[in-house]
Amino acid sequence: MEKNASQDHVLQKVWNGYSDFFNNKKQILASPPIEKLIADMFSVGRFYYYVLNITDSTLTNHHENILAMHGLKKYPLHLKEVLDLVHPDDMDFVMEAERMCLEKMLEIDGFAYQQELKSSYCFRMKTEKGNYEMFHHQAIHTLKDKEGKLLQAVNIHTNISHFTQENSYTVLISGIGNRKDFHQMHYQKGKILPQNKLTKREVEVLGYIAKGYSASQISKVLNISFYTARTHRKNILQKTESKNLLELVKKCFLWGYL
């Protein structure tokens, strides 16, 4: 089948430079366990998800919120339709963020375990109101072929405009499940970060705080004492100079910790 030029999208330009990791052979793929994957992603606000078939950039298994949040009359069937909702001034960053993620994956040999890694960054998208608001993008790879080439991913977009309208231009690759990876990259220099950076354990605890876990729940998940979990929580609030959890989450989006 001849490629439809109208369905070309800018990220393809980035992916074409990493052909060893992307499978371009069209295949019929099974749906991933989306609800299980959502548990490993942050959704502190209205969100939606969709399954991206890498081979032809088609979209399936949309969450119904995508229609209302963007004022769409029908589900987008191709990645280009979603990218067309991104603010034009943010597209250079989106392309560079994708490239940064791929380069970091190469650096850490992440393609060997990429289904246990999540990439995330922020950009503005057009909403049902006709304006542009800040969204948090997360992607997890869900299926590879026998040669290790990527076939499928799940993307989740969360409207975080109630937290911030400022973009930190930070790109993050973090571990999910049992992996503890945390790789933070900055698109532009001069962005404000907390004076005392959080430790790896505090970043891990922060992830559960953002999901709404209590100190008791965090202690059970991380197999630490309740008092240790509570101390981490207290230290995180102090280091980020946050008065409450709402302010903490807002700052951590701005600083690129989530």
Image (cartoon, helix red, strand yellow):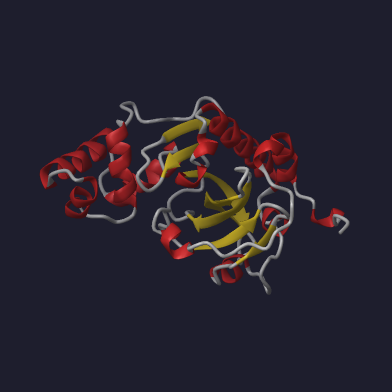
Give the quarter of the figure containing the C terminus. top left
Q: Position of residue 135 (x, y in %)?
A: 53, 52
Q: Residue at x 39, y 41 (%)?
A: 252
224 displayed left or right of 149: left
Q: Nearer the viewer, residue 9 or 233?
A: 9
Give the quarter of the figure containing the N terminus. bottom right
Answer above or below: position of 83 versus 109.
below
The number of callouts visible is: 0
Answer above or below: position of 187 versus 226.
above
Which residue is most to the bottom? Answer: 73
Q: Position of residue 38 (x, y in %)?
A: 44, 59
Q: Position of residue 80 (x, y in %)?
A: 73, 55
Q: Nearer the viewer, residue 171 or 12?
A: 12
Q: Residue at x 59, y 30 (%)?
A: 103
Q: Nearer the viewer, residue 23 or 89?
A: 23
Asked which quadrant contains residue 52, the reply is bottom right
Q: Position of residue 170 (x, y in %)?
A: 51, 36
